[in-house]
Image (tube, rainbow, N blue to C red):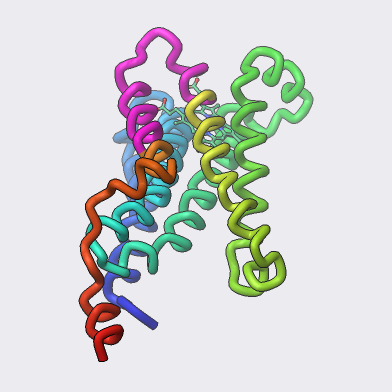
Amino acid sequence: MRYPWFRLAVFLAIALWPVYWLYQAWIFALGPDPGKVLVDRLGLGALILLLITLAMSPLQRVTAWAGWVVVRRQLGLWCFAYVALHLVAYLFFVLGLAWAQLGVELSKRPYIIVGAVAFLILLVLAITSNRYSQRRLGARWKTLHKLAYGVLGLGLLHFLWIVRADLKEWAIYAAVGGVLLLLRVPAISRRLPRRKNKRAFSSNKA
Ligand code: HEM
């Protein structure tokens, strides 16, 4: 396994946030509505993780360090885990498991439908993120996983619908997402400064 310490550091850094937030809720450090704070933090955490996941390939191209793409799958799965926890926290703390209220909630907060579509796409991406699916789907796998950008668009729309008037924070995430999307355009991606991977270079010369 390559870069085991980097993988472990990424794993711990991301796994410990929800544990810390639960601890804060436990010691009453999250204010009068801790459930709502947990929902928000997990939602924002998921969006940030999605942006970080999508930044891994451009980072690898610019720095020639293979470690970035080694943790890409882990990051994507963590994004899915955060969204799943965000959904569970919403069902427990906001909906209070009052299923009869779900219809009213969806008409009152249509942004939940947008979030749910993004969640379902992420579920498909998480299920097909393994090597077996990669082999079975062949070239279609790459096309399918480009849907991560669709998830980003839906996540940003979901967030925009919530913040509405106060656009400052939203605009920062949207700008980062926009830059990452632009970096996928072949004409722009070709112009990125690239550092040569020394190992690949020396093995080519040999
Ligand atoms: C079934 C799926 C989802 C449900 C039920 C859901 C529900 C919610 C709810 C109830 C809120 C709080 C709204 C408020 O403050 O009044 C919220 C906030 C948020 N959600 Fe979701 N969401 C879902 C999926 C997603 C996904 C896929 C993403 C991103 C990838 C996401 C990112 C966010 C963000 C960034 C916020 C705002 C956090 C903040 O205000 O700091 N959500 N969501």
Q: Is residue 4 left or right of residue 128?
A: left
Residue 45 lies in quadrant? top left
Residue 26 shows in this picture? no
Q: Is residue 158 above or below residue 21?
A: above
Q: Is residue 68 above or below residue 206?
A: above
Residue bounds of the magenta highlight: 158-179
Going 21% across and 76% down the picture, which residue do you hit? Answer: 198
Residue 40 lies in quadrant? top left
| Viewer-proximal residue among 204 and 92 | 204
Quarter of the figure that contains the C terminus: bottom left
- Rendered location of residue 15, percent (x, y): 39, 58
| Viewer-proximal residue among 117 and 146 | 146
| Viewer-proximal residue among 61 and 48 | 61
Residue 87 shows in this picture? yes
Magenta segment includes 174? yes
Magenta segment includes 194? no
Residue 169 lies in quadrant? top left
Going 68% across and 34% down the picture, which residue do you hit? Answer: 97
